[in-house]
Image (spheres, rainbow, N blue to C red):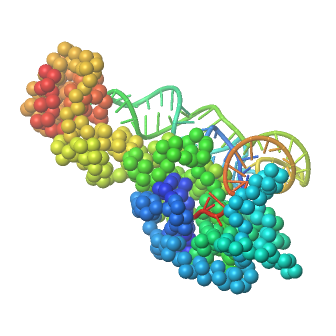
Amino acid sequence: MTVRTRFAPSPTGYLHIGGARTALFAWAYARRHGGKFILRIEDTDVERSTPEAVQAILDGMQWLGLAHDEGPFYQMQRMPRYKEVIAQMLAAGSAYYCYTSAEELEKLRAEQMAKKVKPRYDGRWRPEAGKALPTPPAGVSPVVRFRNPVDGVVAWNDGVKGRIEIANAELDDFIIARADGTPTYNFCVVVDDWDMGITHVIRGDDHVNNTPRQINVLKALGAQVPLYAHLSMILGDDGTKLSKRHGAVSVMQYDEDGYLPEAVLNYLARLGWSHGDEEVFTMEQFVQWFDLDHITSSAAQFNTEKLNWLNAHYIKSAVATRLAGEAAARLARRGIDPESGAPLERVAELYKERVTNLNELADALEPFCVVVHPSAEMIAAHLTDAARAALKVLREKLASCAWEKAAIGAALKETLAACGMKMPQVAIPLRVALLGQPQSPAIDAVVEVLGRDEVLARLDRYI
RNA sequence: GACCCUAUCGUCUAGAGGCCUAGGACAACACCCUUUCACGGUGUGAACCGGGGUUCGACUCCCCGUAGGGUCGCCA
């Protein structure tokens, strides 16, 4: 049996971090077992589904590098198939028409809530041996309901939560087709998983309660029941349910915020799954190690600090060309010409050990492209008369020394000796004069990469 | 309210009855490195929700509490 997993988002918004993890796990499981990963867009909610959201999901998947083997399939394009199955079920008696209006249902629910019982359909249109059904009211188009078994329990061995058992008595006859004839979620999912030969349904925790209904329909259809694995929620940084106010929820926002996809992937992989003490690993390793047994069954709180640490790690190990390219794109978006100054690749090499994200990298590279003027306070604090005098001595040496790090370092040391100063006393004013800020990587390396002409020109403004 | 799920350092987690004096990572703190700020290195503090069982022995198994969460749509 080949493993077939799927990711089935509804296109009502962007791909959020929880969905991304679900997709990652389903993808990894298929990869791990040499199976297929299927992408299915569940767009039967015409009111809320948008083509923009479909695109956003596709973009998110692509950014993460989670490629699907089949699809994307769109449920709206499978309407004839759903209707065919509904007709079959109607004919077989496993589904029936119900003429109860939405208003009546609403009233029923309110009464049940008031009596503090579980709100559920009372089965008034359910055909039963020896039961007289009401006369269908004129002018009401009926919904179609699934005839759920009354007795027994439906149980499954959940891939992450273990055995779950729910009594059929807890389940009511849910609607599989609306009054306008369109099928509903719980029904489409079943038909799709069946038709697409899905063997492992890896999805969010919030679907646990749908599972027994889906299993019952599958059984009524004579279909094979797949293995279900329900992933717990991801909570926000503050331990509350993830929502817009948590800032970065959309996967693409992480791109925007300067995260590398491999960092996000590695972080997500470790959120709710583990492989002993392994913290940092490649997707190849992840695919090799991934299993359902080591998925945690409790909800996990998102921790931006750990993501930041991983991102910094991946930036450190990324090649400078790539980093320079990423930073250049960000600088360009700020209206800065990335080609206008020092070679960015060399600057990126200097900074990659020191930044947490690509936006910080762009910040760091900016003063190498354009002159950044220090604030008045900074000038007053660092570019004192004594400092300026030392910079003047240094300038003369830099005008003629060999242009490589060691020679620049030597010029710096000679300056210190000549002025009777300590390294920071010259290095910090020099940083302020050159970059507009008192901190930077090793100053000799910065001077070298900035170039002689630029260094002298920038110094001349202060001496 | 009913049903379902969950419970180890602040956070992510290891842990399949003795390997646990509970391990790793992020964060915190201290020290070291240092040409500033970082990086890096070393180290320290920090947890089994409570109560009952089962067992020679429970973080691990069972029950009951408690606390969180999810679901009860002609949404997905």
Examine the rendered structure and indicate whether residue A302 appears above or below residue A119: above
Task: State the residue in front, A53 or A64.
Answer: A53
- Residue appearing at x 24%, y 43% in the figure: A335
Task: State the residue in front, A155 or A363.
Answer: A155
Is residue A369 among the parts visible in the rendering?
A: yes
Task: State the residue in front, A430 or A85.
Answer: A85
Is residue A353 among the parts visible in the rendering?
A: no
Examine the rendered structure and indicate whether residue A32 appears above or below residue A460: below
Examine the rendered structure and indicate whether residue A115 appears above or below residue A45: above
Residue lying at the far front in this picture: please name it.
Answer: A138
Q: Please provide percent x and percent y for residue A271.
A: 56, 52
Q: Please provide percent x and percent y for residue A33.
A: 55, 72
Q: Is residue A406 left or right of residue A315?
A: left
Q: Quadrant of the C terminus of chain A?
A: top left
Residue lying at the far top in this picture: please name it.
Answer: A385
Q: Please provide percent x and percent y for residue A253.
A: 43, 49
- Residue appearing at x 75%, y 57% in the figure: A107
Q: Please provide percent x and percent y for residue A121.
A: 76, 64
Examine the rendered structure and indicate whether residue B59 appears above or below residue A414: below
Q: Quadrant of the N terminus of chain A?
A: bottom right
